[in-house]
Amino acid sequence: MLGDRIRELRKSHSLSQVELAEQLHVSKQTISNWENNNIPPSIDTLIRIATFFDVSTDYLLGFSNKRMLNVDGLSDLQIAHLQAVIQDILGNSARDTECEN
């Protein structure tokens, strides 16, 4: 699960293993080992990965599927707009599923 989550996050940020390795100050081989579940990152490194991708360690470890959205620097109005867009998307997804059935 951890390796899959790291790979998923890396790819969603359009990063190669080399680029992620540079950001986390590890080798490309280390990233490959994590993604293939050969070796887990240390606790300190797990926290660095979570911080880098703006996710919780629970998400990385598969204890939660809840993702976070960093809204630092946004006004209350901007945050409200984002919440409305998310609710609209979630509502449309439910309606799309109903239409398919």
Image: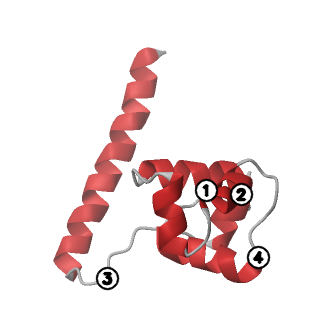
Residue at 32 percent of width and 76 percent of height: 71
Residue 19: x %, y % from top left: 45, 60
> Residue 63's image quarter?
bottom right
Whether pointer 1 and pointer 4 mark residues with C-beta atoms closer than 8 Å, the reply is no
Q: Which mark is residue 72?
A: 3
Work out whether mark 3 precedes mark 1 in sequence or the reverse, and give the earlier one. Answer: 1
Residue 35 x, y percent position in the rendering:
68, 51
Q: Earlier in the sequence, mark 3 or mark 2?
A: 2
Task: Say the numbered circle drawn on residue 34.
Answer: 2
Q: Residue 6's mark?
A: 1
Residue occupying the point 64% across, 63% down: 59
Of tags 3 and 2, which is closer to the observer? 2
Q: Secondary structure at mark 4?
A: loop
The residue drawn where x is 63% and y is 53% is 5
Above or below — where is 7 with respect to 55? above
CA–CA distance in space, label 3 to label 1: 23 Å
Q: Mark 1 or mark 4: which comes first in sequence? A: 1
Q: CA distance from mark 4 to mark 3?
A: 28 Å
At a point 74% along the width and 69% down the height, the residue shown is 41
Could you tell me the amino acid type at mark 3? Asp
- Kindly tell me whether residue 87 is visible in this rendering: yes
Helix, strand, or loop for circle 3? loop
Determine the secondary structure under disc 1: helix
* SS category of the residue bearing label 2: helix
Mark 3 closeness class: few <14, some 14–19, many ≥20 residues within 10 Å: few
Measured in 3D between alpha carbons, the distance from the residue under mark 1 to the one under mark 2, in whole angstroms, is 8 Å
| Tag 1 near tag 2, CB within 8 Å | yes
In this figure, which residue is indicated by the disc labeled 4?
42
